[in-house]
Image (tube, rainbow, N blue to C red):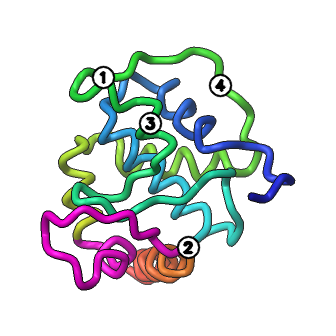
Amino acid sequence: MNKNIQFDIMDVADWFLNKCPVQHKRLQKLCYYAVAWHYALLDRPLCRRDEFQAWVHGPVNSILYSKYKNYVWTPIPQLFGKKDFGESEDVFELVWDTYKDLSGYDLEFLTHDEDPWIIAREGLEEYEPSENIISIDDMKKFYRRVYEEAQND
C-alpha cells in the first residue's frame, strides 16, 4: 500500500454517494471505472485499496463489498460533504457523465464485454466464484485504447 496516496477507496465511493443514492452493484462499478480510467488517463493510482476482483457479476472491491453488502438492493443513502480530489476530479466527472444513466445491471453487462474482467476470469466457468484480481496493466491498456479510439472518431 502506497502511503503517499491521499485518498482511499472509501473516499471514491463517497464521491459518487454525494451525487445521489446508489445501489451497491452500481457503486462497485462506478468506483471500478474511476480507478481504471484514472490509471488509463493519469497513469497513477487514484487511491489506496484499489484492487478489484473479477466476480461473477463484474468487478468488485472487497472493502466496498464488506461495507455495503447489507444494502443488497436498497440504495445506499446520499452523502453530503465532498472532498477535494484536485486534478482527479476531472476523472470522476468523466466517469459520472459517461455512466450516470446506467443501472448496476447495465454496468455489469458492460464490464463483462471488456478485456480487464474477461482476462481476469480466463479459464473460469460463467458462474464460478473468483477472487482473481483485475490487472492494473490490463485496465491501463484497455481503457487507453478505448480513449484513443474515441479521440480518432
Q: Residue at x 45, y 44 (%)?
A: 96
Q: Position of residue 44 (x, y in %)?
A: 71, 67
Q: Position of residue 1 (x, y in %)?
A: 74, 58
In the image: residue 59, left or right of residue 44: left
The residue nearer to you, when weighing 54 against 15, is: 54
Q: Residue at x 30, y 59 (%)?
A: 55
Q: Looking at the image, is mark 3 or mark 1 nearer the viewer?
A: 3
Q: Residue at x 52, y 63 (%)?
A: 36
Magenta stretch holds residue 119 = yes
In space, the residues marked 2 and 1 are separated at their CA atoms by 29 Å
Q: Looking at the image, is mark 4 or mark 2 nearer the viewer?
A: 2
Circle 2 is placed at which residue position? 136
Type of amino acid at the residue the image marks with label 3: Ser
In space, the residues marked 4 and 2 are separated at their CA atoms by 26 Å
Tell me which label, 2 or 1, sits earlier in the chain: 1
Q: The residue tagged with tag 1: helix, strand or loop? A: loop
Circle 3 is placed at which residue position? 66
Is residue 72 placed above or below 32 in the rendered structure? above
Q: Which residues are magenta?
A: 113-135
Circle 1 is placed at which residue position? 75
Farthest left residue? 126
Is residue 76 placed above or below 3 in the rendered structure? above
In space, the residues marked 3 and 2 are separated at their CA atoms by 22 Å
Q: Residues within 10 Å of mark 1 (few under 14, many from 20)?
A: some
Q: Residues within 10 Å of mark 3 (few under 14, many from 20)?
A: few
Circle 4 is placed at which residue position? 82
Type of amino acid at the residue the image marks with label 4: Lys
Tell me which label, 4 or 1, sits earlier in the chain: 1
Q: Residues within 10 Å of mark 2 (few under 14, many from 20)?
A: some
